[in-house]
Image: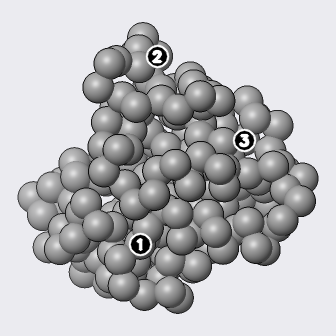
Amino acid sequence: MRLGILGGTFDPPHIGHLLAAVDAYEALALDRLFFVPANTQPLKAGLAAASAHQRLAMVKLLIGGDDRFAADAVEIERAGLSYTVDTLNTFAQRFPNAERFFLVGEDAMTAFGEWRAPEQIVKLARLAILRRPGATVGPDVMAPEGTIALATRLVDVSSTEIRQRVRAGRSIRGFVPESVAKFIETERLYR
């Protein structure tokens, strides 16, 4: 079994996240890809605008009924700061015989040396760096041996921009699925 694990704040999850997941799923020939919303990311503590449970609900709406994907609440259930090494340990216990791939954006890899136990992370899962077309892994990106670089589509959308658009009263149609947009409106998020 080949499993992908895509962690993040997902505040909110958007079409760019979904397309990157599709690209990774296909390129790595995965059997399942798990979206894992952080409870609190150590490097983004205090920056999330939606609660962890709201972000999990939005991830579930993003993936809908697509059997390739699943939302996993492991970090939310654990509470506290979300460390990748702890999450990967949990997945290793749940799926000891699976080949595990941890998907990470190239931008996040610039801080990989600051993560908790990076040497343990690469033992628990193979890193798959999601790269935008034309991007190169620069010298400031720590790419351990065995790391895979995956080309993903260039989708110029960010959670920050979506939150700003909502605050400004602008449409987010096309940035997120309609179900996520309705959730944001109903929950009065990002206002």
Q: Which of labels 1 and 2 is toward the front?
A: 1
Q: CA distance from mark 1 to mark 2?
A: 29 Å
Sequence order check, earlier mark of 3 and 2: 3
Residue at (17, 74) in percent of width and height: 46
Residue at (50, 86) in percent of width and height: 78
Q: Is residue 32 visible?
A: yes
Coordinates of residue 35 in the picture (x, y in percent): 59, 61
Q: CA distance from mark 3 to mark 2?
A: 17 Å
Q: Mark 2, residues whose alpha carbon is within 10 Å: few (<14), some, or many (≥20)?
A: few
Q: Is residue 62 visible?
A: no
Q: Disc 1 designates what residue?
A: 82
Q: Are marks 3 and 1 in contact (CB under 8 Å)?
A: no
Q: In this picture, is 124 found above or below 25?
A: below
- Quarter of the image that includes the C terminus: bottom left
Is 27 left or right of 114, judged from the image as shown?
right
Residue at (43, 67) in percent of width and height: 83
The amino acid at mark 2 is Pro
**Local SS, label 1:** loop
Sequence order check, earlier mark of 1 and 2: 1
Question: Residue placed farthest to the top in the image?
Answer: 134
Coordinates of residue 3 in the picture (x, y in percent): 76, 53
Q: Are marks 3 and 2 in contact (CB under 8 Å)?
A: no
Q: Which mark is residue 133?
A: 2
Q: Which of labels 3 and 1 is toward the front?
A: 1
Q: Disc 3 designates what residue?
A: 25
Q: Are marks 1 and 2 in contact (CB under 8 Å)?
A: no
